[in-house]
Image (cartoon, helix red, strand yellow):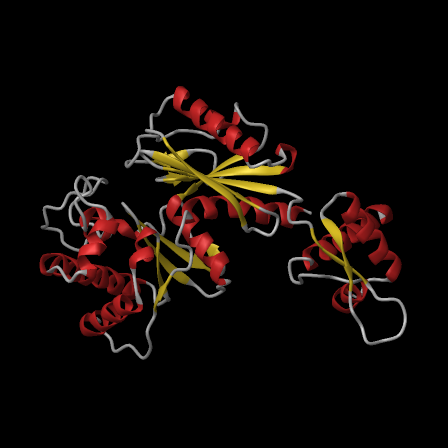
Amino acid sequence: MKDQGMKSVQKNNFAETFHLFYRYDRVSKQVISDNLGHSLPTITSNLKKLLNRELIVKDGEFLTQKTGRPAQAYKLNESAFTSLGMELFGNYITIISLNARGELSAKERIDIIFENTDTYYKKITDELKKFVDSKKLDIDRIVGLGIGIQGLVSDDQRRVVYSKILPMADLTTAAFQKYLPFPVTFLHDADAVALAEQHASKRTEDAIYLSIGEHLGTAMMVDGKIYNGARGRSGTMEHITIAMDDNRLCYCGRHGCIETYVAISTLIDESTETLTSFFDLIHSDDSDTLRRWHQYLNNVAEAIVNLHMFADSPIILAGEITNYLTEKTIGYLEERISQISAFPEEKNYLELGEVHTNPVAFGAALPLVQRFIEEI
């Protein structure tokens, strides 16, 4: 029993030492001692173990004004392990890789039409292997693949429990796992965006994330975690009905959902327009396009006010639309919000997200990085 207790302490000291490398760019034995209070033999032993496992590397010496030998510097080995993320959409996938610090190291988009068939899943896993080879990633250092899904997933992140945008209900990670040598997990795409934004902003307070892409996604962050509720449905505020007698049909089967007012597919005719061409007309002051844009922003403001009435937290606009939003746009939304809000607002609660490219893939890969770090 005494030996088990000693081993537990040693393991905890080792983990604490490794975690310190995520707080500092460079670390010395003195830094470890000042922060953790470990003895010099313990510090030396843990640094040796981290070096042997290639989790850290030596990084020169600390410059000092004091006499004596300069202190050896160590830093995180950013290629110690890799996490992969994938966005899976109707006509393409995006694959990204994150290094040990959770930073983007490579990405690639592949045009491929979705099919709920084994042939399709085999094809995209083949593309994933090509990506690993072309980016010269060490497959033995890949801790897993996170896949952003346009649907709800089970608590264990291994099964799609609801999916109407793409017909993949009851799909399991086994469809991918049988072709890959590392773990595979699923994540609801809106939750992935929220995690990506939280990581980028280092936000700790509760927030609602409104991710606007071809479809709308919403997620709630409470106490630093995604709040999914008892059956994984909490946070799906895109299906709140704001006009019961409206004829706008949502993919969920109901009419008048926020999705039908705020998704990009409600702003442009995707058969003839792109967001880029739409905003080219905005910048040229085309009157009809400006009228459509302002009506759309009014709808967005209405949705924001409804969500804020539900949860009095900051609301972060995220997703593809953020590539085209300006401070002027945010100002317009804030003015409109103040006009229609039921209560006087003492301060603005609307913010613009920071992850403008591939937030779903990024957010799907992040938990694998964090899990690996926590399990050290």
Residue 228 in view: no
Q: Position of residue 292 (x, y in %)?
A: 13, 57
In the image, is residue 302 above or below residue 218? below
Residue under the point 56% across and 51% down: 102
Q: Is residue 223 left or right of residue 101?
A: left
Q: Is 311 positioned to the left or the right of 199 in the image?
A: left
In this rendering, position of residue 75 left or right of residue 309:
right
Q: How many marks?
A: 0
Image x and y of residue 271, in percent: 18, 39
Q: Position of residue 307 (x, y in %)?
A: 29, 61
Residue at screen point 20% across, 70% down: 336
Residue 276's x, y, as percent? 25, 51
Q: Is residue 204 above or below residue 92?
A: below
Q: Nearer the viewer, residue 152 or 40?
A: 40
| Residue at position x 67%, y 61% in the image | 25
Q: From what the image shows, is residue 169 above or below residue 39?
A: above
The single residue placed furthest to the top in the displayed view is 119
Q: Is residue 284 visible?
A: yes
Between 326 and 86, the residue placed more toward the observer is 326
Which sits in the foreground, 296 or 313?
Answer: 296
**Res. 124 image quadrant:** top left
